[in-house]
Amino acid sequence: MAKTDEAAATAALGYEQARDELIDVVRRLEAGGTTLEDSLTLWERGEELAKICRHWLEGARARLDAALADPAESSEQS
């Protein structure tokens, strides 16, 4: 798979999918028994997945903040 294809596939992951894959990556790293190269590849994938999860969570926080701000704006206009 080309780098651009990988990036597109990674970007399309939902929060739950990224979280579940990240959990699997962490388990595999903690279990050990992989080569240094494989461990580095897993670690890099884990970093990508963590970034995706962080993106989703930041988006959710922004939506919550916006939803909580709306009632305050409505009462100020009344």
Image: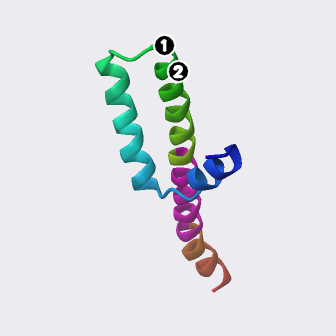
Specify few, some or many for label 1: CA neighbours under 10 Å numbering under 14, 14-19, or 20 or more.
Answer: few
Give the residue at mark 1.
36
Q: Residue 66 falls in which quadrant of the image? A: bottom right
Measured from the top left, where is residue 49 in percent x and y? 51, 41
Query: What's the magenta region?
Result: 54-68
The residue at 52%/63% (across/down) is 64
Q: Does the magenta stretch include residue 23?
A: no
Instruction: Considering the whole magenta stretch, tell me its main secondary structure.
Output: helix
Which residue type carries mark 2?
Answer: Leu
Is 66 drawn above or below residue 30 in the view shown? below
Is 46 drawn above or below residue 59 in the view shown? above
Specify few, some or many for label 2: CA neighbours under 10 Å numbering under 14, 14-19, or 20 or more.
Answer: few
Tag of residue 7: none
The residue at 31%/29% (across/down) is 27
Is 76 drawn above or below residue 42 in the view shown? below
Is 45 drawn above or below residue 4 in the view shown? above
Give the residue at mark 2.
40
Which residue type carries mark 1?
Answer: Leu
